[in-house]
Amino acid sequence: MFQAVRQRLRDMGTIKALCQGAERHALRDGQREPGAEHFLLAALELPDGTARRAFERLQIDPAQLPGAIARQHGEALRGIGLDPEALTALDTAPQPAAQALYNASPSGQAVMQGLAASRGQPLLGAHVVAVIAGMHHGVTARTLRALGLEPQALAASAAHEIQASRFG
């Protein structure tokens, strides 16, 4: 029982780091509510390293993700007739942190709900990758496709990292 309590406390620390990192990435992008893409970037920063290794196993440099995400945001703006460069010139200041309860965008909420459903193991960055690999729509799904990643391959790579962490 004591081990289970210790694991829950560690998981709470991981969730805190994940949410704070996602919020930091969202605010830097000028968004108040982090989306799935911000949770993915935050997962890459977690000290367990499993999210990074899930990408590296597929020969994808995780450092490519921020640029690929930015390109997807730009393409979405162009798709509705807006010039992303002109908008960037108007307002380049990051958003201030909210002083209220933590809130994520619908895609960010979906990530957190997916993580809650995968209970029973220590929470790792690879769990975030696995949840996001299962998302078929949105910025993260388009970003993964733009990088040439098949969702099933990414999910399998994340599962491998999760399994390896249990015995490593």
Image: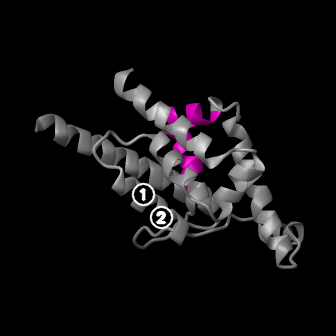
* Nearest to the observer: residue 44 or residue 168: 168
Q: Residue at x 53, y 38 (%)?
A: 156
83 is higher (above) or lower (below) than 134: below
Label 1 Cα crowd, 10 Å radius (few <14 / some 14-19 / many 20+)? some
Q: Which residue is mark 1?
A: 114
Q: Residue furthest bottom?
A: 81
Query: Dividing the image into 4 quarters, which one contains the C terminus?
Result: top left
Label 2 Cα crowd, 10 Å radius (few <14 / some 14-19 / many 20+)? some
75 is higher (above) or lower (below) than 68: below
43 in the magenta segment? yes
Res 110 label = 2
Residue 120, image x, y percentages: 27, 44
Query: Do residues under tags 2 and 1 come within 8 Å of each other at their CB atoms?
Result: yes
Q: Is residue 114 visible?
A: yes
Magenta residues, as a range?
39-55
Residue 30, image x, y percentages: 67, 66
163 in the magenta segment? no
